[in-house]
Amino acid sequence: MALTDTSAWRALTAHRDTIQGRHLRELFADDAQRGQRFALEAVGVYFDYSKQRVTDETVRLLLALARERGLDEARQAMFAGDVINVTERRAALHVALRMPKGESIRVDGRDVVADVHGVLDRMAAFAAKVRSGKWLGHTGRPIRNIVNIGIGGSALGPVMAYRALRHYSPRELTFRFVSNMDPTDLAEAVRDLDAEETLFIVCSKTFGTLETLTNARAARAWCLARLGSERALPRHFVAVSSNAERVAQFGIDTANMFGFWDWVGGRYSMDSAIGLSTMVAIGPDGFADLLAGFHAMDTHFRDTPLERNLPALMGLLGVWNTNFLGAETVAVLPYSQYLSRFPAYLQQLTMESNGKSVVAGRAVAVNYQTGPIYWGEPGTDGQHSFYQLIHQGTHVIPCDFIGFCQALDPLGDQHDLLMSNLFAQTEALAFGKTHEQVLAEGVPEWQAPYRVFDGNRPTTTLLLERLTPHALGTLVALYEHSVYTQGVIWGIDSFDQWGVELGKALALRVAPELAGAGEPAAAHDSSTNALIRRYRQLKAGQA
Ligand code: G6Q
């Protein structure tokens, strides 16, 4: 049945009209316990959704929608290794990557959890060697610089996790991340590094991605020029991939390769061998703690009834905001400088997963909105730029505020000041400031309209004790499962990415034309032809 024909969807559509006219001020005034009743705690995450524009009835209807759309069965199917990635005909089993030793999930008769731990053990041995200075470069000097080369799912997780957990990494090791085809990325990453002490981790699930292979070739040339011998390379290059053949073809010894499997999607892979740089940074124990955080949230998602299930509720609130309150974006606002790349990481996770418009398995177009646009920056910086629009603009922008109760780098009362900003922002967004309040502050009548805040702007606050590897794992898994929840409601495949594949193919077609002269060889549209001509002309003038 089409989503919009379900009885729960219809009931929510009717219910929306009763909510439209209600203000959060009123909802809080009517229920002194609202702040506690619309909050949950699980796996160390305090999840306050009382400042969302919902009532008990909204939540009841959203839960009914989840049941009608088969979320209970869908979450079991994910953990059973069923083919939930229907357009690529495979399982999406990232939950197996963080299962403890001894548990088991079978794919085609094979225990994949045992395979996962086989790779984790090899990663741990390697990471320990690098960290202790026992992994030596070709000239006998210990490795001190780690450069991760990869893009998309093979980059965003590693760079986000490194920044997030930098507090726990030994400062004598330098980490760099190269992803962009722009040669500047590699040039700047290696500019001040000594090749004798540098190790490249080439991450590519397919080992066929143009950007990654191009950067890896350039890195190899950089190494060769400085170390003078092909024999040096095995000490300075390792690979992470699911394609051993291509790794060998590229010239990396497969003894120095860490594998993963086709049931791990790129954007769900930061806890696979793609996390090798993370493991070197925080150590095997730290990485185990990260995986334990993921696993704790997995278990919560799998076993907890929907009404107390954090990822399910988070996903459903997103559906409510997107499909019933007309929100088109979600702002992610971590009050932690360590989480500076978390919004970028979530952009891929959410938008590559749920940026779809065809119903999975039925091949018909959806007639409702699907994944919203995710964006964000750490607070308090964002407060001095784009928050203006969130407070007083014309768009509804639901926000996720993320904060920690303990500082990793305590400095006077700065952490309290940081968190007071978080709490104050959610309060201001919910309750706003009326015309009367503005006048009572002594603002002149003529200026008051500009200084009124309507409020009634929905936010969720995620409060955690401290930013640890475990906490990061729970946060990422929370978003992963909330994305899946939404995919199930919308009936789309959250695990394919045909839109990304298109870009990979198109660039290859244009590339030879940029090198040539005269008219572009292939007949593009008049705009593209003119751009290519102009590019060649100006490029010719380069010294
Ligand atoms: C992620 C996507 C995409 C992918 C990159 C890199 O889910 O599939 O971002 O991770 O295109 O692919 P490789 O790891 O194969 O180089």
Image: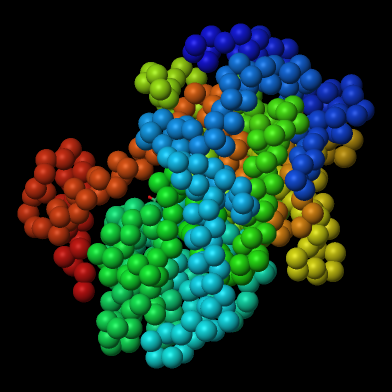
Q: Residue at the spot x=65%, y=48% of the render?
A: 295
Residue sitting at the far front: 109
From this viewpoint, is residue 480 visible?
yes
The residue closer to the viewer here, 5 or 460, is 5
Q: Is residue 298 left or right of residue 369?
A: right
Above or below, comparing residue 320 to residue 531 in the picture: above
Rendering coords of residue 453 (x, y %): 75, 34
Q: Residue farthest to the right?
A: 32
Q: Residue at x 54, y 50 (%)?
A: 113
- Does residue 120 lie above or below 21 as drawn? below
Quarter that holds the C terminus = bottom left
Q: Residue visible at 69% across and 31% down?
A: 313
Q: Nearer the viewer, residue 24 or 198?
A: 198
Q: x and y percent of residue 525 in the render?
A: 18, 38
Q: Relative to the observer, which residue lies in front, 215 or 265?
A: 265
Q: Residue 210, located in which quarter of the rendered image? A: bottom left
Answer left or right for 290 relative to 178.
right
Query: Total label count?
Result: 0
Residue 390, placed above or below residue 376: above
| Residue 320, quarter of picture | top right
Q: Is residue 266 above or below residue 204?
A: above
Give x and y (percent) for residue 540. Answer: 16, 65
Query: How are the colours assigned in the image?
Result: rainbow
- Percent x, y for residue 61? 69, 16
Q: Is residue 245 left or right of residue 407?
A: left
For image coordinates 28% across by 65% down, the residue present is 248
User: Can residue 20 be seen at all in this image of the molecule?
Assistant: no
11 lies left or right of 535: right
